[in-house]
Image (tube, rainbow, N blue to C red):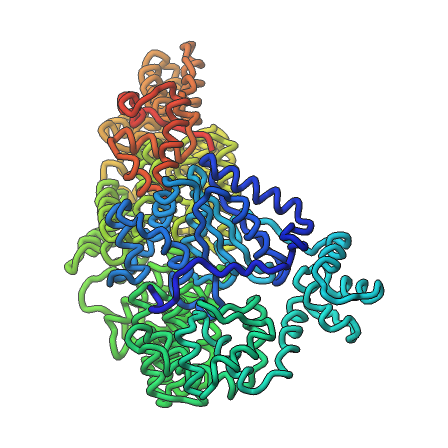
Amino acid sequence: MPNGSVTVSVASHRASPALAGARGRIVGRQGEVRRLDELVGAARVSRGGALVLRGEAGIGKSTLLDHARRAASGFQIVEASGSQYEMELPFAALHQLCVPLLSHLDELPAQHREALQVAFGLISGAPDMFRIGLATLELLAAAASDGPLLCLIDDAQWLDTASSKALAFVARRVGSEQVAIVLALRSETAAGELDELPHLSVGGLNDLDARSLLTARSHLTLDDQVGQRIMAEARGNPLALLELPTAGGFDAPDLSFVPTRIERGFQARLPRLADEARLLLTIASADPTGDPGLLWPAARLLEIDPVTVGAAAAATGLVEFSTRVRFCHPLARSAVYRAADPDLRRTAHRVLAEVTNADADPDRRAWHRAQACTGPDDDVADELDRSASRARARGGVVAAAAFIERSAALSTRAPQRIDRTLAAVQAHLDAAATDTAANLLTSIENVALDELQLTRIDLLRGQIAYVRHSDGNGPTFVLRAARRLAESDPARARECVLDALEMSLVVGRAGGVMDMALAAAQDATLASQSPDTLQALTRLATDGHRVGVPLIREVLDGDDGPLWTQRPALAIVLAAELWDPQLHDTIVDWLMKTGRESGSPHLLRLGLAQTTSNAALTGDFGKAMEAIAEEEAIADAIGGPPVFYHRLQLAAMRGRRQEALELFETATAAAAVRGASQQIANVHWAEAVLNNGLANYPAALTAARRASADGELYLAGISLSELIEAAMRCGEPELAATALKSLTERTEASGTTFGLGVAAYARGLVTGVEDHYREAVERLEESPLLPYRARARLLYGEWLRREGRRRDCREHLHIAHELLSGAGLEAFAQRAADELRATGDKVRNRSTSSYDQLTLQETCVARLVATGATTNEVAGRLFISPRTVDAHLRAIFRKLGISSRRELRNSGILDQVSGTTS
């Protein structure tokens, strides 16, 4: 177990009478009951789903979970419950849910079985966070093969982060399984990934149902006036309707938040208890495990008699002492804990720490010791530090952050306290708790710090700024850290400058960062004795491509290994700046191989996005869509932000106007929120390509001007050919000639066939010299970049037609049309067709392929299966269950009119897919 001693059992049935009438009948809630019945009924027939019940404390969510349990006759039922005191313990709730199903572990692929075993503490190792969600899905699916499965999770607002992410992942993918998942959480709390699941708001009861519940369950005789007051103050909250009558209805009206009122009602039972009974309740409230094996030994340390004192505490109705220690409601636990004075709480934690096994559960013992401290304590701080290390090794970044932050607070020595505080800031950043990290960093702003600590702070501030969408100061902080290091460690300082560039590229906010980085590199203290990446970039910017390109090639190869093994995002744009598709292929191959071997989602997403870009530029749209589907699956699995640039490139090449414009609008809006200037530049380039294809040259010219003016590496250069074409069509030859000069410098310096070929047809557009068009056709004839090969033919054919050479132009236009229509570049293909018709030729429009009916994910499944991948292999690649893969295959077979995998392999789908439905 990840936390050492959380008891794994079916969660306590807190099925309060909150909504039940005299014989267990639910009062009201017809709509909620119907929705739950539909969910359970659908799961019986392999149409699984999830539902989140949201409502304030005491509103009756637990009772609705009880209804789901009763409705699921014949189901296997597993349950878990979040704990406010275990939110930092990774996978605690997931383990609680899955323990009854662990007999199915052997049915999982080895990697996924081991991922769960490590996460649950069954074997040692670092958990594979990337695969735990899919492993959980497979475990539930395996269990459901024995019969439908119902998963009930109460108090989901208190799930640990790791469990919450895994459950959200699973909940989105059970559509083809006999699995229903119902989660209950409080409406006043944010729930991260769970907020995106289908939900049902559980509100207060109407007056009729409220009166019915009040009458049926109250043991007091209430007159109408008192009953009306109670109903008004309860506001339809069932638990309030049951608790408020105990006050007789004669206290002053209280308009505070109803759960707060209920909590005070629970606290009102405490003053009449003896001190020992209150102390026993406090100990119980401080122990989230509900383990009597901890409570009674702790009580005996304080010489509390379990029999007599336990009976007095239980008589309050707040707690039940049985095989588990259960409070009647989470509000009752928090009410007891909050009502205890600090000394009483510290006493409770002290005795709990003493009875907690230091070997079996060192982290919980350390936490109790920390809560028992009255001031700094280095011994406890050291113990918490060790707990943080263990949590980090288990992948529990949230727990690690909590442990190390508390360790810092208890440290007496200033240097150690500062170092631990900075480590806690980094841990909170790793846990995506950016605001917490930022607030913690401010706590040491006025402390005397040495230069190294100030450098660490600047680097941390830089990370925080990069994560925050509205904060553009990330490069400023990182570059300031570089200047601090310049004298003591100039090599590390130059690395910091490159870190600023890499991070900016990764988050898509590189606009202006290159200029800042190059300015920082001019500092004499940052000077390098040998050529390095910064020096190469500086020479490229100051002396141009003829001087800079050889240096760029040198640093890409690198004496210490290829640049892409250290800074892949920077290496990618530099390879593109060199117009070198072969080098780009090499980098992509490394990204995919390394990403798959290491399981790194960052490398895999980058590799898949670049695979899409490469496929779009070579006209292999099926491969592009396969990569997009897999990248989106990984992003969804890890909760990563969407990536757009590769989809923009595909949309531009395909040339479907409305589809592309909608994507451009979405990407622009997302970029505005994130401050992603680089993404805006990608949109401008894509708009230029799209509109050149559509022959909307004024729009193409506007977009190309913006793309080239943005000055982004690669995009500024590749946009020049679009600018030249649009400018010549719009009657602006001077603008085209200026752009051609820049394009020529770039492509001649690179010396690649691709760059020289594109520059040749751009030169033909400006000069009208036939040899330039011929040069373009010859250079690009063997190029894998089909769209550019075809466009060279198209532009030459268009020029020949305008020269009145109809017979000559038809050959090139026919080749262009066949290439463009065959690959699915619809706008450019239409341009070629229009030119052919203008010569008097008849052109057959490309018939709609049955492959165009496939969705993006169906396309990916079909292509993977066509290469021989098994169902389980496809499921693993796309983070879906095998049953979902089979469901996709049934849909694919139906749409393509086939009935077997062999027919799919023989269908030519790997060559023919060029478009899909959304």
Which of 244 and 915 lies nearest the eye of the viewer?
Answer: 244
Residue 200 lies, in percent from the top left, at 60, 49
Locate residue 88: give its quadrant. Answer: bottom left
409 sits to left or right of 392: right
Which residue is at 63% across, 73% downward?
A: 266
Q: Nearer the viewer, residue 237 or 602?
A: 237
Can you say which quadrant of the picture contains the N terminus?
Answer: bottom left
Which residue lies most toward the left here?
A: 559
Q: Is residue 533 left or right of residue 880?
A: left
Q: Position of residue 364 (x, y in %)?
A: 38, 75
Residue drawn at (42%, 39%), measured in percent from left and top? 177
Q: Position of residue 458 (x, y in %)?
A: 39, 73
Toward which corner of the image does residue 428 lie, by quadrant?
A: bottom left
Q: Is residue 489 above or below residue 234?
A: below
Quadrant of res 808:
top left
Is residue 475 in sight in this rendering? no
Position of residue 683 measured from the top left corner of the image (x, y, whole percent): 46, 43
Pick whichever, 37 or 592, lies toward us: 37
Residue sitting at x 47%, y 40%: 48
Count of numbered marks: 0
Does residue 181 show up?
A: yes
Residue 376 against residue 388 in the figure, above or below: below
